[in-house]
Image (cartoon, rainbow, N blue to C red):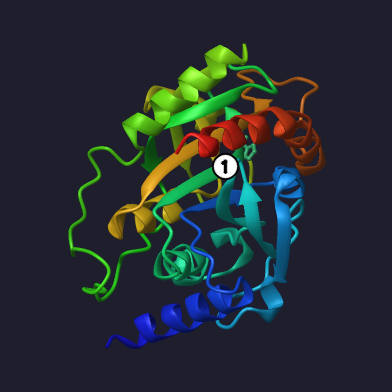
Amino acid sequence: MDERVVKFKETAAFILAKIRGEKPETAIILGSGLGRLAEQIEDPVIIPYAGIPHFVHSTAIGHKGNLICGTLGGKKVLAMQGRFHYYEGYSMQEVTYPVRAMYFAGIKNLFVSNAAGGVNYDYKVGDLMIIRDHINLLPNPLIGKNVEEIGPRFPDMTRPYDLSLIQLAETVAAEHHIRLQKGVYLGGTGPTYETPAEYRFFRLAGADAVGMSTVPEVIVARHCGLRVFGMSVITNEAHEFPLDYVNDGDDVIKAADKAAGVMSMLFTKMIERL
Ligand code: HPA
């Protein structure tokens, strides 16, 4: 067996032992400022990343660093309160490690969320955007020897975000009068926010929102065949000619935190109907 698989299986076995053999089918990755969803998980078993074999620690602001196992929308879930970013200095293998470990723990669906800058001029701070596609400007996490036990050397990326989950999100949103945007997320390395010229470049390239995460996790999830749903919270708007405006990490977290309640409700109602 590939030695990487041995580690994934050790992590998965550790998590499953903590939840006494429950079989979570859905994992949720909570982005910057979005960790509050975890508070709605019933009968939570909270496992700090530091205590999980082969996990690394999260240092980003707005990220707590706990795996929360429990029930959401009547279903067993694993929720990552905080993720690992390439800009923190982790390798792409470390960034994506939890997704593969959770795959070996038996999950079938992955819900990913993030705080993102609005590149599309129609987007306003606080908007929620269904990620319908992405552009990857981070190193590809599948570079290197392929893990044959997990997936193919050249994975298809025609439909990275599951169409039936997108439809479900739109149905739930319509029922609860939640306005949703739907667009393309561009994942860059960060940690700098974009220059005005970069925001313009990304808009011309077809991006609607930009952030520093998510895409690596989605690539790895698709490689192992998980169904993926992605959502961005628009926390700041691109400015063409900024005179007195700056992007600020604390403002991003505040904006994400404000929208976290609606996103949590949407995720919960979706998971209920899976
Ligand atoms: N750019 C990149 N990442 C981000 C942004 C942004 O404008 N906002 C929140 N995360």
Q: Which picture quadrant has residue 263?
A: top right
List x then y, in percent, for residue 35: 72, 48
Q: Secondary structure at mark 1?
A: strand
List x then y, in percent, for residue 100: 42, 67
Tell me the residue at 61%/75% (across/down). Answer: 56
**In the displayed structure image, the side of residue 17 where residue 219 appears, left or right:** left
Q: Is mark 1 within 8 Å of ligand 1?
A: no
Above or below, 96 against 1 in this view is: above
Quick check: can you spot residue 207? no
Tell me the residue at 47%/20% (across/down). Answer: 170
In the image, 21 versus 97, the foreground residue is 21
Number of marks: 1
Residue carrying label 1: 113
List x then y, in percent, for residue 101: 46, 70
In the image, 102 versus 56, the foreground residue is 102
Ligand 1 is located in which of the four quadrants? top right
Above or below, 102 against 164 in this view is: below
- Dot 1 amino acid type: Ser
Tell me the residue at 49%/70% (across/down). Answer: 91
**In the displayed structure image, the side of residue 140 where residue 77 appears, left or right:** right
Point out the image quarter for the C terminus.
top left
Quick check: can you spot residue 32? yes
In the image, 262 versus 187, the foreground residue is 262
Above or below, 153 against 116 in this view is: below
List x then y, in percent, for residue 99: 46, 62
Above or below, 78 against 89 in this view is: above
Query: How packed is label 1: few (under 14 Cα within 10 Å), some, or many (20 or more)?
Result: many
Point out the image quarter for the N terminus.
bottom left
Q: Which picture quadrant has residue 268?
A: top right
